[in-house]
Image (cartoon, helix red, strand yellow):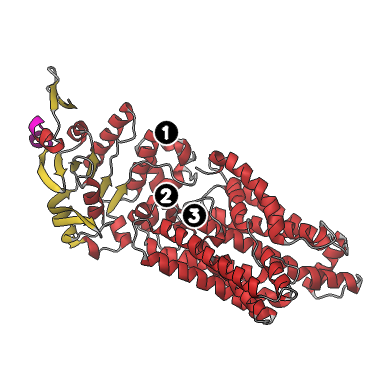
């Protein structure tokens, strides 16, 4: 009896579709499913629409970019988390393990501190994430050790702490009335400001990173074995590790640059995906991407509809993620190892 | 084909474990590596596998320096069976065995139908085809060892190197794995394994290599090398030799 991946992928797809329908229809300006279908169909076929222009604008200009951004960020963080959990042979690892988020955070608060524009702040965050991981990788490789993976993780923790101190310093020095609230808001994560111009800078790096990870999907199975075993199976672990880290860092940094710090997604979704389709990367990666997109979309819809003011995404993902994680610890034996 | 270490100095970047070691193995032959803990067995094993670079001397595989092989070409010629471990993720037994096919594919490829056929045949050979869709994490230790043997076989190598293949197995499974090692030699593989039990060397190996403090104590056919005096010298401990009066089979016990 071969366990098929199809039921699991179908469940993930249902979550994504449910997320899409909810995200487009629910909110301060409710949209009916009929209007949604009509507008999307008309847009796709180039016809004129007969719905109110306000509704069309809500669907295409207000919610559309935000929905696409949520799906991409959720998918990107989940795919990166899946890759890192395999690479570090540890199911408790998340995409920021090598300092991508801390580096992006420092870049972003510096951008805000110097009163730069939104695009510049995003670029600072993106580059900050890349630099942080590059630094961690160089330090980790310079330390000659028998267990390069362990050294890499520890270096990530140490450098992450240092970058955290940097963020603290910049916040301490920042103007408490203008800059500090902006920094706090950014660090808590939000898609409220996502617009059409955000989509391409997000999509490019995410697509490149995800394509590399998908291309290497079978090798990633082998990379989750102990180093010497992977080598003896014919895998050049050193270069492959660099490729995987670079690809996952690209997707993570682009996501964080767009949406701020959103924890938990990259930790929780890979587990959910694994429970749906098993740990085999060729089926796990697409499942994690689809499920992660749907998951963050649902969380983001909750963030903008649950209360009179928007709840920061980072807070909601933690509120949802913590109980899940406790459940995970209690059921660890079943889902992995 | 022959794998051969000549005048090897083995060790890690910060220390030397053994010097002046010559060791060779032909296909169709089983060599057992015996010695006390810390004597250099695992270090020698990893050097022959190409996982550690010799600090001096050379490992040659089929007359060509092992260091000149690509990592993939090496994996298609020499397979490694590590000590049984559970692993982080619950891959199916089939996926674990398919990983043995990695060196036969390209960087971006996935297992083909042919790879699946080879993996299935390897599982069948060890009588564990029924386990194919079970999670590797949920089968017994003896079954895991057989799965790792099947993975090594799926690499279609000339040589199979095993690190203490019987260490974590119960009595019955120890016998089973020893028997499988013998059949690997009859099917043309060269097999090298380390063990703490001289009786396993007697059972499964043609030759034995005794290693203490990074120095070779003796090497030769198991009958000529494995006797009470040599083992006492090897382990610096008193040894008792038992002989079955009916079959003449020999066994050793620590005293």
The structure residue drawn at horizontal position 13% and vertical position 38%, both measured from the top left corner, is B234
Say which of B161 and B1 sits in front: B161
Q: Which mark is residue B140?
A: 1
Within 10 Å of disc 2 (Cα), the crowding (few <14, some 14-19, many 20+) is: many
Q: What residue is disc 2 on?
A: B98
In the rendered structure, are the residues bearing label 2 and label 3 in contact, judged by CB atoms less than 8 Å apart? no
Q: Is residue A6 visible?
A: no
Residue A289 left/right relative to A219? right
- Callouts 2 and 3 in the same chain: no
The x, y position of residue A281, in whole percent, is 52, 54
SS type, badge 3: helix
Q: Nearer the viewer, mark 1 or mark 2?
A: 1
SS type, badge 2: helix
The x, y position of residue A216, in whole percent, is 47, 62
Mark 1–mark 3 Cα distance, whole angstroms, equals 24 Å
The structure residue drawn at horizontal position 57% and vertical position 60%, both measured from the top left corner, is A79
Within 10 Å of disc 3 (Cα), the crowding (few <14, some 14-19, many 20+) is: many
Say which of B24 and A168 sits in front: A168
Q: Main secondary structure of the magenta part?
A: helix
């Amino acid at each position: 009896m071969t366990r098929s991946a199809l039921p699991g992928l179908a469940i993930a797809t249902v979550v994504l579709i449910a997320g899409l329908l909810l995200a487009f229809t629910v909110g301060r300006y409710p949209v009916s499913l009929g209007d949604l279908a009509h507008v999307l169909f008309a847009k796709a076929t180039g016809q004129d629409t007969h719905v109110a222009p306000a509704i069309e604008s809500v669907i295409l200009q207000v919610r559309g970019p935000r929905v696409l951004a949520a799906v991409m960020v959720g998918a990107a963080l989940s795919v990166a988390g899946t890759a890192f959990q395999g690479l570090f042979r540890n199911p408790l690892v998340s995409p920021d393990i090598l300092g991508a988020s801390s580096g992006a955070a420092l870049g972003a608060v510096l951008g805000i501190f110097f009163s730069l524009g939104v695009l510049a702040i995003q670029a600072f965050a993106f580059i900050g994430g890349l630099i942080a991981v590059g630094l961690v990788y160089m330090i980790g490789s310079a330390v000659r050790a028998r267990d390069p993976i362990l050294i890499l993780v520890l270096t990530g923790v140490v450098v992450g702490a240092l970058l955290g101190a940097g963020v603290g310093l910049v916040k301490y020095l920042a103007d408490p009335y203008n800059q500090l609230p902006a920094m706090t808001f950014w660090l808590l994560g939000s898609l409220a400001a996502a617009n059409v111009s955000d989509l391409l800078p997000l999509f490019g790096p995410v697509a490149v990173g995800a394509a590399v990870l998908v291309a290497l999907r079978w090798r990633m199975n082998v990379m989750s074995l102990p180093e010497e075993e992977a080598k003896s199976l014919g895998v050049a672990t050193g270069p492959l590790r660099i490729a995987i880290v670079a690809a996952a860092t690209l997707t993570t940094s682009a996501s964080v640059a767009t949406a701020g710090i959103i924890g938990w997604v990259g930790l929780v979704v890979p587990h959910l995906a694994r429970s749906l389709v098993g740990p085999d990367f060729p089926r796990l990666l697409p499942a994690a991407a689809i499920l992660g997109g749907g998951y963050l979309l649902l969380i983001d819809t909750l963030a903008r509809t649950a209360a009179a003011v928007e709840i920061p995404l980072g807070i909601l993902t933690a509120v949802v993620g913590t109980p899940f994680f406790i459940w995970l610890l209690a059921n660890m034996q079943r889902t992995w190892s | 084909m022959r794998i051969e270490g000549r005048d090897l100095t083995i060790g890690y970047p910060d220390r030397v474990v053994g010097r002046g070691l010559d060791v060779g193995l032909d296909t169709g032959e089983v060599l057992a590596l015996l010695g006390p803990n810390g004597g250099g067995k695992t270090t020698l094993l990893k050097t022959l596998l190409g996982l550690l670079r010799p600090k001096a001397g050379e490992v040659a595989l089929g007359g060509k320096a092992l260091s000149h092989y690509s990592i993939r070409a090496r994996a298609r010629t020499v397979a490694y069976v590590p000590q049984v471990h559970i692993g982080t993720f619950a891959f199916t037994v089939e996926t674990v065995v398919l990983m043995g096919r990695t060196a036969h594919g390209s960087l971006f490829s996935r297992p083909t139908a042919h790879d699946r056929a080879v993996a299935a045949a390897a599982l069948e050979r060890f009588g564990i085809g029924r386990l194919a869709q079970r999670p590797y994490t949920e089968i017994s230790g003896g079954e895991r060892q057989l799965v790792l043997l099947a993975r090594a076989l799926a690499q279609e190598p000339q040589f199979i190197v095993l690190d203490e293949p019987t260490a974590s197995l119960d009595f019955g499974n120890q016998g089973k794995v020893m028997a499988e090692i013998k059949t690997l030699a009859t099917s043309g593989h060269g097999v090298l394994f380390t063990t703490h039990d001289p009786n396993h060397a007697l059972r499964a190996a043609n030759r034995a290599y005794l290693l203490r403090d990074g120095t070779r104590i003796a090497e030769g056919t198991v009958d000529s090398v494995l006797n009470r005096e040599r083992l006492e010298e090897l382990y610096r401990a008193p040894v008792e030799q038992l002989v079955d009066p009916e079959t003449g089979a020999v066994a050793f016990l620590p005293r």
